[in-house]
Amino acid sequence: MPSMKAIKRRIASVDTTKKIMKAMDMVAAAKLQKAKTRLEGVRPFAAEARNILSAIDYEEARGNMFFKPRKVTHTAYVVITSDRGLCGSHNVNLTEKVLSHIGAAQNERIIAVGLKGHEYFSARGKNILRTYPDVSETVFYADAMRIADYMTSLFTSGEVDEVYAAYTQFESALTHVPRIVKILPLPLRLAAAPRADDMRYDPDVHSFLDHTIPMFLNAFVYAALIESSACEQAARMISMESAVDNASDIISKLTRTYNRRRQTAITQEISEIVSSANTMK
């Protein structure tokens, strides 16, 4: 049974941890607001890039390599996770979904965006082509361009035949949805937007696609990075709030235990004094 001194040390230790968790909660809340603001700006940009491709004359674009289906031999997964933990099940939900999507196949290629994804798939012996650390905390458009350029080079060189993007979609501070989206080859219908019959391409539709598709892929990856970043901060904020509440409960229980011990000790001392006084008489 721990002594009163040990209980006091335990209370002080938990209280220090509680203060750290509270500070991390406040930092995560501030980062979440920043990520939500960026997300509100990038979603229309990604949607407009998608709409541009939706209005293309697909009869002319059908032969483009980015739309042409292939016999699938190797598949690449761009998996966007965080670099740090303490964000609940944010990373586990996504990585387990990717692992389930891969199944028993041995032809997968992993592009890990974030150290947690790298650690997860490395521990399971998966083929990791490249890892991009230090992206989730401060997402820049240049990061999205580097990732999109690399996965495009894998596809155009024939090293992989299809590319999936795995990320967590932000719906609210409490709702985060893991998603796996096929991005290469592009589907012939990206959206339900009507085709503009008066569109003209100069010099031709294939030259237009050569410039438009990289822009679309950059926008898609950038939006996915921002979505995942917002989910990470929201998950970390919730985890820290839960940790603070648990620490408060522990401190409350320890304080009650300490008070009972102290009351027992005081009662025993009084009893000993009274007993000594009676003996003296």
Image (cartoon, rainbow, N blue to C red):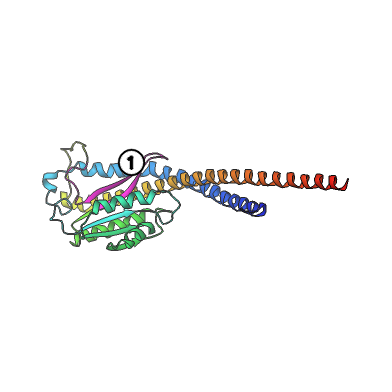
Which x, y percent locates residue 119?
36, 60
Q: Is residue 34 left or right of residue 155?
A: right
Q: 196 and 8: which one is in front? A: 8
Count of labels shown?
1
Q: Which residue is mark 1?
A: 44
Residue at 38% x, 57% y is 116
Image location of residue 280, percent across then percent down:
87, 48
Q: Secondary structure at mark 1?
A: helix
Magenta-colored span = 164-190
The three-letter code of the residue at mark 1 reads Pro
How far across and how far down the image is residue 242, in percent? 49, 44
Q: Which image quarter: residue 114?
A: bottom left
Q: Is residue 187 visible?
A: yes
Q: Is residue 146 visible?
A: no
Residue 123 in which image quadrant? bottom left
Question: Looking at the image, which residue is at 31% across and 51% down?
Answer: 96
Is residue 178 in the magenta section? yes
Decide which of 127, 57 is in the foreground and name it: 127
* x, y percent for residue 100: 26, 51
| Residue 261 magenta | no
Task: Depth check: give the residue in front, 84 or 266.
Answer: 266
Query: Which sits in the foreground, 107 or 3?
Result: 3
Q: Quadrant of the C terminus?
A: top right
In the image: residue 158, left or right of residue 171 = left
Around disc 1, counting alpha carbons within 10 Å, would you say few (fewer than 14), some (14 to 19), or many (20 or more)? few
Q: State the residue lying farthest toward the right.
A: 281
Query: What residue do we see at 48% from left, 47% from top?
Result: 28
